[in-house]
Image: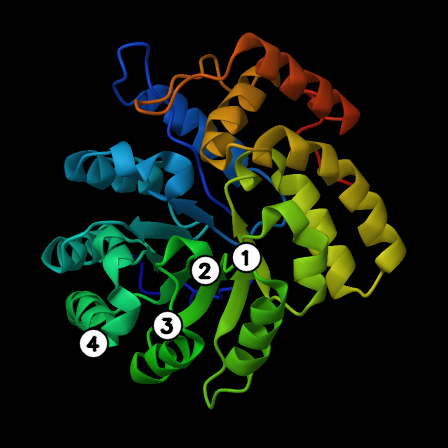
């Protein structure tokens, strides 16, 4: 890691990359390198997230997660900040992932709550404190903390969220997917009001314009693996208070919302892979079980919606006017 890198700014558009697989369901390193190069070429992005939900991190081994970090840094170098997901039920393993990411030159971490905490972790906040302590003891990298949907039973109650931000100065932003507009706005305001402001990166991709308009500092989304240029254009329009332009860009984004985020939601990243194949950005679109390839009728639906959004292989990564 170079010593003259700029401090990580948790702001702007941060796509979360997909993870391509071969027909034998091995990681397709060649396709992954191409995908990273394509997404990182988008003018105006602020970073790239790896080993997140978009990368099917639940189905990656720890060794594969480590390998993804190495490949990503080899492709991106220091041209685009790298945010590494820390996704594990083990606090000890989380600390090792964090330390490895720092050694390999990552710029920040995206910390997921352990899945087992769905059984009542919100009632034992000391558990997530311990989880974060292990991570911050192992690495000095800035942290983006993932705030899950309320329905998941993994969301941090607002008092807990604010206390975590006070206790751990490494937390520079929240990736917010709380799914509740009222809570979303209150979190944005309360996080900005802390003695040390913590940014909000929305991942409410199904209502992105409304979310950004509430005052988010950026967005972190798997949809950025497909439509990063549109997300950059929308973010810039909102930042400029240009509602007319923002609405026009949102009208282009909306067909992709229907393509990616219709029920069942767990197919969203499968659909993004299909979109990249249709757009000529991936050669194949394999997913690891229990995820399954969308049915032919759904792939045709995705094709039609991409066309409605005006997306073609030669325009996907072109700067949006």
Whether the residues at callouts 1 and 4 have beta carbons within 8 Å, the answer is: no
- Foreground: 161 or 74? 161
Regarding mark 3 in the picture, which secondary structure is present there?
Answer: strand
Quadrant in which the C terminus is drawn: top right
Q: Nearer the viewer, mark 2 or mark 4?
A: 2
Q: Earlier in the sequence, mark 2 or mark 4?
A: 4
Label for residue 171? Answer: 3
Q: Residue furthest bottom?
A: 195
State the separation of the CA atoms marked 1 and 4: 24 Å
What colour scheme does the image use? rainbow
Image spot of residue 219 (x, y percent): 57, 55
Q: Which residue is mark 2?
A: 150
Q: Which residue is mark 4?
A: 126
State the separation of the CA atoms marked 2 and 4: 19 Å
* Residue 31 against residue 260 in the figure, above or below: above
Residue 321 in view of the camera: no
Regarding mark 1 in the picture, which secondary structure is present there?
Answer: loop
Q: Residues within 10 Å of mark 1 (few under 14, many from 20)?
A: some
Label for residue 179? Answer: 1
């Amino acid at each position: 890691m170079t010593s003259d890198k700029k401090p990580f700014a948790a702001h702007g558009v941060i796509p979360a990359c997909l993870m391509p697989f071969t027909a034998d369901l091995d990681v397709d390193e060649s396709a992954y390198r191409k995908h990273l190069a394509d997404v990182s070429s988008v003018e105006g992005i602020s970073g790239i997230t790896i080993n997140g939900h978009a990368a099917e991190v639940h189905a990656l081994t720890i060794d594969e997660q480590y390998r993804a970090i190495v490949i990503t840094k080899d492709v991106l170098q220091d041209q685009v900040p790298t945010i590494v997901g820390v996704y594990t039920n083990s606090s000890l393993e989380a600390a090792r992932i964090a330390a490895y990411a720092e050694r390999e030159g990552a710029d920040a971490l995206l910390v997921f709550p352990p899945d087992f905490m769905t059984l009542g972790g919100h009632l034992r906040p000391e558990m997530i404190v311990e989880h974060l302590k292990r991570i911050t003891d192992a690495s000095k990298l800035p942290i983006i903390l993932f705030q899950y949907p309320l329905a998941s039973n993994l969301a941090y109650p607002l008092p807990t969220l604010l206390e975590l931000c006070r206790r751990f100065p490494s937390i520079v932003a929240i990736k917010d997917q709380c799914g509740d507009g009222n809570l979303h706005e209150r979190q944005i305001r309360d996080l900005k009001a802390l003695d040390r402001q913590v940014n909000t990166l929305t991942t409410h991709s199904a209502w992105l314009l409304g979310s950004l308009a509430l005052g988010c500092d950026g967005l972190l989304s798997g949809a950025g693996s497909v439509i990063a240029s549109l997300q950059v254009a929308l973010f810039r329009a909102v930042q400029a208070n240009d509602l007319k332009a923002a609405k026009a860009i949102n009208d282009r984004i909306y067909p992709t919302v229907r393509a990616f985020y219709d029920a069942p939601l767990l197919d969203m990243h499968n659909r993004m892979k299909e979109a990249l194949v249709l757009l000529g950005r991936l050669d194949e679109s394999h997913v690891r079980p229990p995820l399954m390839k969308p049915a032919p009728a759904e792939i045709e639906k995705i094709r039609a919606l991409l066309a409605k959004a005006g997306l073609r292989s030669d325009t996907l990564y072109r700067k949006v006017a």
